[in-house]
Amino acid sequence: MVATISEETKVRDEIVDVGKSLFDRGLTAGSTGNISVRLSDGRMLMTPTNASLGGLDPARLSLFSADGIHESGDRPTKEAFLHQCMYCGKDGRRAVVHLHSTYSVAASVLKKVDHRDVLPPLTAYYVMRVGALPLVPYFPPGDQALAAAVGAAAADHHAVLMANHGPVVAGKTLTDAQYATEELEETAKLFLLLQNHEIRPLTEEQRSALIDPSK
């Protein structure tokens, strides 16, 4: 299937709108963070390097072929591989959001967390939008070893937290990816606010019922 001009234009505008929303609400700062959307023909649009999500130009977004080759637009971010890794999941992923959002990054720096699932199931919406959140070990930005680690985690999870770096979240739509990222950030904030307090997370039975409502 070949993506139509109207589809590509719509996606470009959507990326700009979501980027501005995230930036204006302080979920990303400076030129940090990036967004991508896979078009119906397999090509991918992504925010370019050194671009603030608060001031994106739809015409300058990086465009990749279905094989991951940069075709047009501004020079791509060195974190492009993070997005490509996230699309290898099996649940129809069409968009990825990666941020350096404050509370999520803070949680990724904590020493005593469960690397298999960093945040406890504090709310129903976190469980429904994010589920389990594995922690990927630290690698320098752009390191191909990070690609392998994220790809391995992304096979079974649509949200991954990179140690000392931040979250990368995939969704079936850009809206899904955005909302899941925001829910992750809010839950990380709650998690940090509740440090040194006794908490009452959802039980395993309550959590399972949200993941599989048939139970």
Image (cartoon, rainbow, N blue to C red):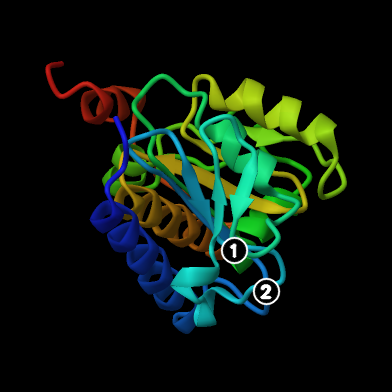
Name the quarter where the N terminus is drawn. top left
Q: Are marks 2 and 1 in contact (CB under 8 Å)?
A: no
Secondary structure under tag 1 reads helix
Which residue bears the numbered disc 1? 103
Q: Spatial distance from mark 2 to mark 1, Cα to Cα?
A: 18 Å
- Specify whether 43 is left or right of 150: left
Q: In terms of sequence position, does the residue under pointer 2 or pointer 1 come before the other?
A: 2
Q: Is 16 above or below relative to 161?
A: below
Left or right side of 124 for 17: right
Residue closer to the observer: 113 or 78:
78
Q: Is residue 108 above or below residue 138?
A: below
- The image position of residue 210, as x and y in percent, is 23, 31
The x and y percentages for residue 154 are 56, 27
Amino acid type of the residue that numbered disc 1 sits on in the rendered structure: Tyr
Q: Please give the label number shown on residue 31.
A: 2
Instruction: Identify the residue at horizontal 64%, vertical 73% (top origin).
Output: 51
Residue 206 is marked as: none
